[in-house]
Amino acid sequence: MTPVTIEYEGTTVSYQHQLWRLRPVSVCANYRHNLSEFSPCTVKAAQLFNALCMEVARQARNAATVAAMGNSDPRLARERDKTCEAYRSMKAGT
């Protein structure tokens, strides 16, 4: 297990993981005995994990797009087109 402590939006979020598997009972364990701090910490932890997952997915899409540029492989071209369409949709929504 790898222990991690991150300051996220003013809250110290601690957890443990091993090979991208989170140990659920470790999330905010430093606040477990104080419900008034534990509950907000778990909310921030959920937001943090969501943000981290979105960033990993974004980076993976970017890597797929770069790999597909100038490549004639139909699978990579479909992935590129899917990524570009998702970007256009996201940009149109802002």
Image (cartoon, grey):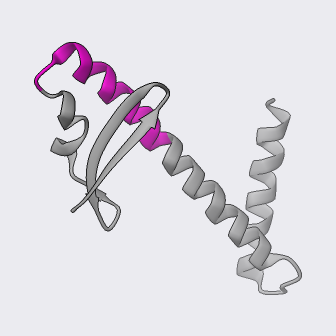
Position in image of residue 3 (x %, y %): 26, 54
For residue 39: magenta?
yes
Q: Residue at x 50, y 27 (%)?
A: 9
Decide which of 29, 91 is in the foreground and name it: 29
The one nearer the camera, 65 or 79, is 65
Q: Nearer the viewer, residue 51 or 11?
A: 11
Outermost bottom residue: 72
Q: Quadrant of residue 82 in the image?
A: bottom right
Is 47 above or below relative to 83?
A: above
> Percent position (x, y) of residue 88?
84, 46
Quadrant in which residue 47 is drawn: top left
Q: Position of residue 51 (x, y in %)?
A: 52, 41
Whether residue 45 appears in this view of the structure is yes
* Image quarter (top left, top right, bottom left or bottom right) of the C terminus: top right
Q: Is residue 77 visible?
A: no
User: Residue placed farthest to the top in the image?
Assistant: 36
Q: Pick out the residue farthest to the right.
A: 70
Q: Is residue 15 above or below residue 3?
A: above
Q: Residue at x 22, y 13 (%)?
A: 36
| Number of marks | 0
The magenta stretch spans which residues?
Answer: 33-50
Q: Residue at x 35, y 62 (%)?
A: 20
**65 vs 39, nearest the viewer:** 39
Instruction: In the rendered view, tell whether residue 70 sits above or below residue 81.
Output: below
Is residue 36 covered in magenta? yes
Residue 38 placement, left or right of 71 = left
Residue 27 at what x, y percent from top left? 25, 40
Q: Main secondary structure of the magenta part?
A: helix
Quadrant location of the N terminus? bottom left
